[in-house]
Amino acid sequence: MANPATTSVLEQEETRTTVPRIAVVGVGGYAGGELARLLLHHPRLRKTPPIFLGRAGEAETTASTHLEDLHPHLATPGSRKKNEVHPFGWQKLADSGTQILFLATPHEQSREWVPEAIERGIRVIDLSGAWRLHQTTNRAIYKLKDTNAEHAAQLQSEAVYGSPELHRDDIRSARLVANPGCYATSAILALAPLVQAGLVDLDHGIICDAKSGVSGAGKAPTSKTHFMYAADNLSAYAVFGHRHTGELLEQLHLQSDQIQFTPHLLPIPRGILSTIYLRLRQPSNATVVTEALQNFYQHSPLVRLHTTPQLPEIQHVVRTNFCDIGFALAADGHRLIMVSCLDNLLKGAAGQAVQNLNLMCGWNEEEGLL
């Protein structure tokens, strides 16, 4: 038996705090696998590991499998098949006493299941784009259909955009958190401090040139993510029509003609680098930009600011939960280039979802992520 004198502060706190029962639906994909890994190693969940359920569309009669079969790198010594993945079923969630549900599911499935979860008193962190956008025109790109339009509209109105750096206080008490898109996270975190401080010449416009690894397209193979297409290649796609554009407009309070976002596919497994071109309203210096960033992120443990002229690189953030931000200011004091980097599967998806979980549970937001 462990000596009480050697019990860690965290373990002592766990004995006084009820840890919510957590379930994850959709652990078969890339983001779902990373989410499972983070939760299994989360210090708060050592005694109450999450329940894992399969992908959307699986019948409740489908035989269970194991997490280690889907993601062999999660196998543990001496117990290769420790974590069972159950077929999805509301009764399974009810029997387990689930209080917080992660949905790593397609947009259409999340839009259908969230109302049911909320009705059952389960708080939801949704990794899809189903609930991120409040404006109908922006959400139209997903072509979502609601069984009960009135109920969906009510839930949409209370959905909190899950960017802790922007909406930390609202996330703590939210019933429904819409985890941001990976591209959107990279661009918004670079721009929000400057836009909020009124430093950006919005009439001049913003250009966001973003590049992502192939895992950003999801696990299902397509002709564009096939090795023979993606390898030794670099391609732009969804020009003037990427679904993350609406997130930039809504979260930065911009008009569509004030920002141009163009994504590109990099021939690497994971990581995002966004190069953002803008013009400042007044001639300025590096100190002003640095202070705006530092003031905005002084309480954000998962944002790392680079000292100019150092700029972030993908290799420095891959397999971490950080977003790295740096900038370069032209000698004229007007032209500014922001560079933002993150791992699209972590800070751009699963890591940010766990960050939101921490806030919803009243824990330090970086727990289990550093």
Image (tube, rainbow, N blue to C red):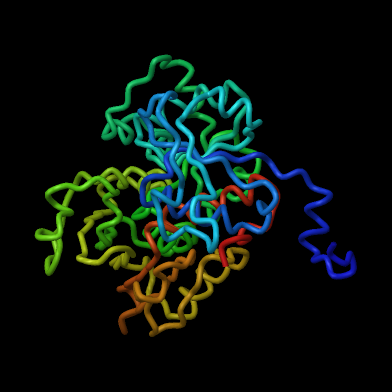
Residue 229 placement (x, y as % from top left): 10, 58
Say which of 130 and 79 sits in front: 79
Residue depicted at x 66% and y 31%: 97
- Extreme-front residue of the structure: 78
Say which of 87 and 128 sits in front: 87
Left or right of 93 in this view: 230:
left
Left or right of 222 in this view: 77:
right
Residue 40 placement (x, y as % from top left): 57, 54
Please say if 189 is above or below 219.
below
Determine which quarter of the picture holds residue 332.
bottom left
Say which of 75 and 272 sits in front: 75
Left or right of 328 in this view: 209:
left
Residue 240 placement (x, y as % from top left): 19, 47
Is residue 125 visible in the rendered image? The answer is no
Residue 293 placement (x, y as % from top left): 50, 69
Is residue 18 visible in the rendered image? The answer is yes
Determine which quarter of the picture holds residue 220.
top left
Residue depicted at x 48% and y 35%: 86
How many marks on residues?
0
Residue depicted at x 62% and y 47%: 49
Residue depicted at x 56% and y 39%: 23
Quadrant location of the N terminus?
bottom right
